[in-house]
Image: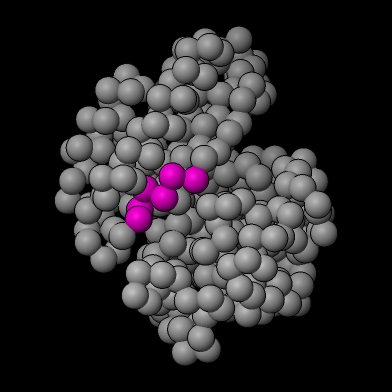
Amino acid sequence: MPRVAAIDCGTNSLRLLIADVSPESGELADVERTMEIVRLGQGVDRTGRFAEEALERTFRVCRRYADLIERHGAERVRFVATSASRDVANRDAFAQGVLDTLGVRPQVVTGDTEAAYSFTGATRELLGRPEVPGPYLVVDIGGGSTEFVLGGDRVEAARSVDIGCVRMTERHLVRDGAVTDPPEPGQVEAIRADVEAALDLAADTVPLTGAHTLVGLAGSVTTVAAIALGLTEYDPAVIHHARVPRDKVAEITRSLLTATHAERAAIPVMHPGRVDVIGAGALVLLAVMERTGAQEVVVSEHDILDGIAFEVAQEHR
């Protein structure tokens, strides 16, 4: 049974999936799924460059992932870099560091390719299930960008816009080098204005009200879901395919945007690397639900990683 490794390098997190692939069906079986917050996109919106300390954090985790890949004997490895890596002047230094540590060059993908990976990973398990009817609008809220993908058994329309949780936090919530805690109403409104403008752009390409089911991906969405479910520890199995009503998302968003750093950090399911950016991420999710008219979001723990692994497996069947 072939074993593949997929790495998703985003603005905020660096994630690894090692999976076995069924030769008959092409289905994936997890061997290892892990995530580290590296904040690679630190300051990119302002400087247009990767910070040296951000590169070092990323390469340190790459070295650990290389050990895991070798230990588990993955035969094929693909490293996909998304939003932050599209925007920087020193991308070559990043690419060389990844090559040196993992032995593969990063594939810096367009927003459309990122969207297609996310859609495949999120919807393959949903197809044919009457309780989650298509077409689906998959919304992947990342650190630097958010991807919107509409489709049924295939992608029909996709658009990537620059409203990630890290980008919005750094652009609007940082003052004198520190995140305002809690944010001021004017800062929150500035995020909301950027998000609404980005939704207008997305709607030029993707019919935002054309889906039966809204599917939400990535850490901002799964963290909001974990809070909504009242979990005392983060449990992907419980979060996967949970349904969170819009009024609950609104309640949690208000709470996060009026909380202090200490109050957010004390939430049992909160990853330390999300404490400063979760308010902006939750606000993006709420704005999307309001614009689309979705009364609930179906939360998926399977996303771009699964889409990458599936494509690698398909290429070698």
Rendering quarter of residue 254: bottom right
Rendering quarter of residue 301: top right
Count of marks, rendered view: 0
Q: Position of residue 68 (x, y in %)?
A: 52, 19
Asked if residue 160 is positioned above or below residue 201 in the image, the reply reads above
Q: What stretch is highlighted in magenta?
A: 37-42
- What secondary structure is the magenta-colored segment mainly? loop
> Which residue lies at the image location 44% right of the left edge and 32% below the top edge?
61
Q: Is residue 115 a member of the stretch shown in magenta?
A: no
Q: Position of residue 94 (x, y in %)?
A: 25, 38
Q: Where is residue 300 in the image (x, y as percent from the top left)?
A: 67, 49
Residue 151 in view in this figure: no
Residue 81 in view in this figure: yes
Asked if residue 58 is positioned above or below residue 78 in the image, the reply reads below
Q: Where is residue 41 in the image (x, y as percent from the top left)?
A: 35, 53
Split into 4 quadrants, where in the image is the N terminus?
top right
> Which residue lies at the image location 52% right of the left edge and 32% below the top edge?
16
> Which residue lies at the image location 61% right of the left edge and 18% below the top edge?
20
Asked if residue 188 is positioned above or below residue 50 in the image, the reply reads below
Q: Give the residue at the far bottom of this rendering.
A: 186
Rendering quarter of residue 170: bottom left
Foreground residue, 50 or 179?
A: 179
> Which residue lies at the image location 18% right of the left edge and 46% below the top edge?
90
Foreground residue, 250 or 166?
A: 166
Foreground residue, 252 or 106?
A: 252
Q: In this figure, which colouring scheme has been used for the structure?
A: one colour
